[in-house]
Amino acid sequence: MRGLLRALRGYAFTVAGIAIGVAGIVALGAMGERIVAFIEGGDRFVLGQISVAGRGMGMGAGFTAGGLLPAASIEAIRTVEGVAGVQAQVMLPLNPSTSQFLTLTQELVVGMDVAVPMPNRHYPTLPVRHGRFLRQGDRRRAVVGASFAASHGLAVGSPLVLEGERYEVVGVLDRMMTAPDRFVIVPIADARDQWVAKDRLLRTLLASGAAALRADDLNTGAAVGWRAGADPDAVAHRIREQVPGVNVQIPSELSELLRSSTAFFSALLVGIGVLAFVIGGLSLANTVAAAVFERIRDFGVKRALGASDWQLGREVLVEALAVTISGGALGVAVDRWVQQAGQELFLFSPRLLGGALIFSLALGSAAAAYAALRIVRLSPAEAIRRGSAA
């Protein structure tokens, strides 16, 4: 064991090189894993409801991007055949100066009318990891997504300032691998206040008194559920036909939009990942073999002193595998540290990290076997001569 540790110290640069290579390969794979998880999570979320928004462009963001959706339109949606529930919502960008529609890092303030049950079939309630969800009558309370909490250092009881108003975080959602991970969910009355504070045009309209707007008219959209046995796409088309002045997202079309918007990036990552595995694999194997050949003189001396082929081959194999495993484990540890730092672009799944270790172990074994075979075929004099020349 002491000899192995001394040998590993001599291979320090080799271990570092393997670690960097493995970390890079795993990072590329983790980007692909994150895209796949986002698509799957987004599919589940958007296919669970029909998203409706006011027609026109306003402060609305996310899946219900659009203008004003007044209370009269929401009541009209409730009367459409097949509709089971309608929840008014206000969805605003946390930072209005950036446009991040349907991106992995979009941060949204979402106001929900908690007096109405969530109509999303796949998420009748959003999963809360810590604390609780909003309750009817709450004001200046917030529930934050897992990624938002991690990136902003928030926990249950933490203060959060939105548009100059102080909120208390009462809940942190479980990680869902899709849009709600970046949500700040507040009571809809608070979100309406934030909308007025953010939107200068809306403030001007309210101050002029030109439009008879009530508080419950200030909605950017609504989540709509459908009755059991109804076709959600057909219900969405009926809403579009029967309710004027609304934009309706057909669930299947929105799902296809989500997939097509990330298809090119996913294909590019797959291609880069395959290339990285080939190049990185060859580099890793070459690094291990070269590191072993650097000690060829030592092996020649041991051969001259009576070491058998089996003893030399075993020593080469053990050292090469120790170097490979150490480098691979260090590379995976680097990626795990990145994951725990609250990043959003990577998903280091157990299968990916385990696969990276198996990949490095397999290539290290192959390289070690090749190096051992070359060394045991050399005579002691030839090995010492080559080692001295190197």
Image (cartoon, rainbow, N blue to C red):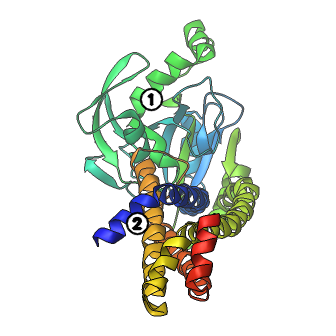
The kind of residue tagged 1 is Ala
Indicate the secondary structure of the residue bearing disc 2: helix
User: If the image is split into quadrants, where does the C terminus sit?
Assistant: bottom right
The kind of residue tagged 2 is Ala
Reading the chain from its start, which is encountered first: label 2 or label 1?
A: 2
Left/right of residue 203 with respect to residue 129 in the rendered view: right
Indicate the secondary structure of the residue bearing disc 1: helix
Q: State the mark number for residue 263.
A: none
Q: Which residue occupies 64% across, 69% down?
A: 286
The residue where tag 2 is placed is 7
Q: For label 1, count other residues whose C-alpha is less than 10 Å away and answer few (under 14), some (14-19) or many (20+).
A: many
Q: Is residue 241 above or below residue 377?
A: above
Single out the residue that lies furthest toward the top: 208
Left/right of residue 186 with respect to residue 54 in the rendered view: left
Left/right of residue 341 with respect to residue 90 in the rendered view: left
Q: Nearer the viewer, residue 369 or 55?
A: 369
Q: Is residue 53 above or below residue 231?
A: above
Q: Which residue occupies 40% across, 15% down?
A: 164
Mark-to-mark CA distance, 2 and 1 = 63 Å
Q: Is residue 124 above or below residue 87?
A: below
The residue where tag 1 is placed is 191
Residue 279 location (% of width, % of height): 70, 65
Q: Which residue occupies 58% across, 58% down?
A: 21
